[in-house]
Amino acid sequence: MNQTGPAKRKDNETISKHINYLIQNFPEFEQLYEDYSRLIKLLLTKIGLIMRHIGIIPHKI
């Protein structure tokens, strides 16, 4: 089954509208969203460091 939603289409406006709706209607969602955003950024940073360490990504000069 192929995904055809806004994320697949890279439709950031629709994604933003969905996030804003969730924040407005579910106040606890905002903190959850911020926490997960920080976690994802941290994980991506760690993955990048590991990939550099094992030679998949060249070290910055």
Image (cartoon, helix red, strand yellow):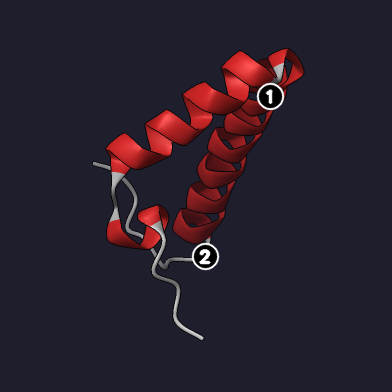
User: Where residue 36 sits: x, y (%)?
Assistant: 66, 32
Q: Quadrant of residue 46?
A: top right
Answer with left or right where residue 54 lies relative to residue 35.
Answer: left
Q: Three-letter amino acid code at disc 2?
A: Ile
Asked if residue 50 is positioned above or below residue 23 in the image, the reply reads: below
Indicate the secondary structure of the residue bearing disc 2: loop
Instruction: Please tell me which residue is depicted at 29% across the width and 35% down the height of the picture.
Output: 13
Q: Quadrant of residue 22?
A: top right
User: Where residue 11 sits: x, y (%)?
Assistant: 28, 48
Q: Which residue is mark 2?
A: 54
Q: Three-letter amino acid code at disc 1?
A: Asp
Which residue is nearer to you in this view: 53 or 46? Answer: 46
Which of the two discs, 1 and 2, labels the residue nearer the N terminus?
1
Residue, far left: 61
Instruction: Please tell me which residue is depicted at 59% across the width and 39% down the height of the picture.
Output: 40
Answer with left or right where residue 29 lies relative to residue 14.
Answer: right
Asked if residue 3 is positioned above or below residue 17 in the image, the reply reads: below
Q: Which residue is mark 1?
A: 35
Camera-nearest label, 1 or 2: 1
